Image (spheres, coloured by chain):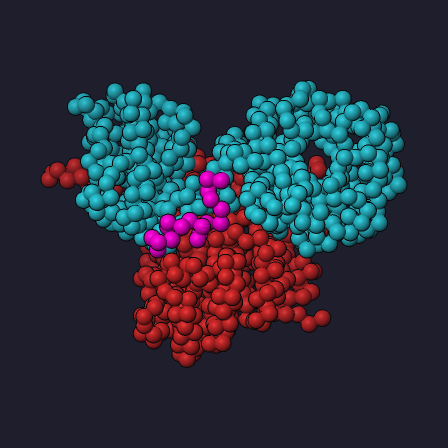
Chain colours: A red, B cyan
Amino acid sequence: MSRDRLYLFDTTLRDGAQTAGIEFSLEDKIAIAGLLEDLGVDYVEGGYPGANPVDTGFFEKKRTRKATFTAFGMTKRAGRSAANDPGVMGIVNSAADAACFVAKAWDYQVELALGSTTDEHLEGIADTVRTAVAAGKEALIDLEHFFDGYKANRAYALACVTTALEAGARWVVLCDTNGGTMPAEVRQIVGDVLEVAPGDKLGIHPHDDTGQAVANALAAIEAGVRQVQGTLNGLGERCGNANLVTLIPTLVLKPFYAERYETGIDAPRLARLTQISRAFDDRLNRAPARQAPYVGASAFATKAGIHASALLKDFSTYEHVPPESVGNERSIMVSQQAGRSNLLTALARHGIAIEKDDPRLEKLLATVKDREARGYSYDGADASFAVLARHTLGTLPDFFQVENYRAMVERRHNAMGEEVTVTEAVVKIRVEGELLMSVAEGNGPVNALDLALRKDLGVYSSRIEDLELVDFKVRILDGGTGAVTRVLVESRDGSGERWGTIGVSPNIIDASFEALYESITYKLLITEAA
Amino acid sequence: MSRDRLYLFDTTLRDGAQTAGIEFSLEDKIAIAGLLEDLGVDYVEGGYPGANPVDTGFFEKKRTRKATFTAFGMTKRAGRSAANDPGVMGIVNSAADAACFVAKAWDYQVELALGSTTDEHLEGIADTVRTAVAAGKEALIDLEHFFDGYKANRAYALACVTTALEAGARWVVLCDTNGGTMPAEVRQIVGDVLEVAPGDKLGIHPHDDTGQAVANALAAIEAGVRQVQGTLNGLGERCGNANLVTLIPTLVLKPFYAERYETGIDAPRLARLTQISRAFDDRLNRAPARQAPYVGASAFATKAGIHASALLKDFSTYEHVPPESVGNERSIMVSQQAGRSNLLTALARHGIAIEKDDPRLEKLLATVKDREARGYSYDGADASFAVLARHTLGTLPDFFQVENYRAMVERRHNAMGEEVTVTEAVVKIRVEGELLMSVAEGNGPVNALDLALRKDLGVYSSRIEDLELVDFKVRILDGGTGAVTRVLVESRDGSGERWGTIGVSPNIIDASFEALYESITYKLLITEAA
């Protein structure tokens, strides 16, 4: 049976960005676009050029290789042509491949919010689409509040669809903007829209306000649409957008969908899903949802006593899909089998050659599990894993030893009565038998320690000259200041290589120092070979 | 149109109890049963008497007034009659009104896991049901892995259904035990089961492994079943059970369902939903899910600026249900697009009365925008907003002044050569003209400062005795240790009230201190009135 192509449109960097407490920097957007390319979505909606400096900067160049790089904006304002609308032209003149304009599909809102007429609004949709298409962009129209608009005035909602398509839009997306539509309604309404528009030009944009965003996406696909808009980990305002991480495995692994539809996500990409989802949470400094479908830490966790040991051997009797297909792990508090093969894979990735039955593997496995139980997570700290592995296997050079360190922050008044904060750190290390002691001031205790630690590394100083700290994330596990702090440090050197290191301690300074120390150690490791 | 009665069956205390990390004490179970009565569910499945002491104790007396108090267990073991099965009799002899026995509906599992024959298993179902009914209990049968069993051997699965009903079961519940069934499949399979059994004796027990537990429940109801099994806040192993808190408002408020079905939940009970959901999270000491449908803190939160002020007046244009119907609140956040009207709404929320045209409003607006540009975000720090507002409006009492503070972390070797970290903080404050100086040690610099700051607040010490720090979040804005740190602190006091405060500085210690200081100030503010 030939399969229809489904297109996945990610709006993490645009609709997802509207989530309370989320602010993407330019660096963040570039990194997340990279994750999305790795996943294999078809469209990456990167933001709203012209709306703020980060988005304008993001659209100065094309940020994706394969995915269609899409800019978001609004259809032209009433009273001027699209070509004279700076918002529209900002998008048209950007480095985007495609332009996705939001328009109203509810007559009441056109009058109330835009102070426009329904005819003017239709003409605005057409003019905007034509302008974008003429400029060589693929044009999409997001019809806001489509389902409510359809229920209020079916003819107008359908006219918005046909107007956009006739003007040359590649896609018209039906948005359930307030998230209150039921799957049965989606099915029925989409069926009606298909009377006036072909399914392969229609998309669905659900929200999770009734906990059915994914179900609505699937209902729309079953009814005939061929594009789905969602976000990584369901990021989005209120209750979130449709979670692509939840949706994609269902489309790729469940026969009902896999037999009828194909996406741009093959098996190897799907197997990276868990790692991509967690890398995204790391970047947002958010705790991953333990119970997330498919990728959550608990998603395939069973209490061993529930299942007779006979069942344990036949996973299909209690697992709906194999966890490895999405890059997750089965977690049965009995077996360590899953751990061993993951470890060998990770060691190979670092060029550490070791036999499958080397006795040191058990020790390393136990060390990693013990650390993970204490709060370490090597998902975003691969360099710390490399250091730990070499240390456990006895192949880590002893570059320098830290004798002691201290950091002090003092907030006081200076001689002129102004409030100032003074931060000073002292680090004492031993290199090749020689004791070196350095002091530095910084704009915070970790900055001061970082500077003091790197100030004088004796014979190694030149090898860390191009080492740069790029990002620093802090997470408190178990809440409160009495709990464990996990610090993730991202570093970079002159070659452009980036690596992550981790430190865990009840004391944030100790945790930070550990991560800094491992970053330097890793840099010395990778510059050893020559 | 006459409506069909839908029965809500809560299994928080049984299936929900299987969640990793969850242990209910007897006290917990009694309190949670109270919450469930308050909500108005029809069945409360309290646990498995005989399986452990808490459950056995829980079933010594009837713990519900209106809801049917239900005990869970397994159908009789092979080789003995139900009357001679201690497990079954433990349930039959308990104070439960109803008994819900789990049985296999998948022939393969009967052989593999039970070492029984399919015929013996059917006879076991019948014998168990008859025994319970004869003892005066309402009998239910949970058919485990029903949908997979049906796909493997339709005849056997259906035989399990009819056998249970013929023996006198009031309900047969179709369980999607591994959570992998699609709504379309549920619809089709339930439709087939209805050929051999009446819908008003059938129930559905979904799991959320594909993010569609609620959708599956609704699909089953639409197909004809009349009982739904779920849990509070979707508690449950792996990805959780069907979340009754998400499902109930849809059934009661959405016309498609409200016109066809009635439940035991009337409008006043529904309006207690948010409070019940949060009380449950409090009992489990879990952070409530901010983005939970209907009851989440963000569920009705919009960033102003997205909506023209015209829309703000007509809530139905962007809210799918009124938040008050589920006991939640509309929240228009004081954000970067904060306009004058948003500010007034936020001030009113804090009981700060002010005229629309008060000139101080402009100043406050400018202050908020300036702070937000510097990294402050008041979304999760409403108490800091209250403090800032009163300060700007000149109505903040001057409780105490901080003269200076310092925090020092030192990592060194002690007299026994062990590596230790010593963390000490000193805080000097002035209260009612008197200089008070305190020192404290902590397991980190912020913990030490927190303890030192609260150690001696002079005349205010008693008012902060019940102040507790609950959570502490750190984010670095713009990456690297040379950037701005944003610290969010969540606090709680003896009354159960929670609030958030924020601090922003390039120095993490200063940022933390600011958030701690504002939390104390807010606590003093709210205890001022008397």
- Give the residue at the far front of this rendering: B1
| Picture residue at 30% right of the left edge, 47% below the top | B341
Q: Is residue A449 visible?
A: no
Using the image as rendered, state which of residue A173 and residue B120 is in the foreground. A173
Query: Which span is picked out in magenta?
Result: B308-325
| Picture residue at 50% right of the left edge, 65% below the top | A157
Q: Is residue B394 left or right of residue B90?
A: left
Q: Position of residue B411 (x, y in %)?
A: 36, 36
Quadrant assignment, res A18? bottom left
Q: Is residue B342 left or right of residue B23?
A: left
The quadrant the N terminus of chain B occupies is top right
Q: Position of residue B197 (x, y in %)?
A: 79, 44
| Picture residue at 68% right of the left edge, 55% below the top | B184
The quadrant the C terminus of chain B occupies is top left
Q: Is residue A40 magenta?
A: no
- Give the residue at the far left of this rendering: A416
Q: Is residue B168 visible?
A: yes
Using the image as rendered, state which of residue A253 and residue A72 is in the foreground. A72
Q: Is residue B314 magenta?
A: yes
| Picture residue at 37% right of the left edge, 55% below the top | B306
Q: Position of residue B173 (x, y in %)?
A: 73, 40
Using the image as rendered, state which of residue B354 and residue A142 is in the foreground. B354
Using the image as rendered, state which of residue A278 and residue A260 is in the foreground. A260
Residue B260 versus residue A222 in the image, above or below? above
Q: Position of residue B249 (x, y in %)?
A: 55, 42
Instruction: Examine the residues drawn in magenta and state their main secondary structure.
Output: helix
Q: Is residue B469 left or right of residue B57?
A: left
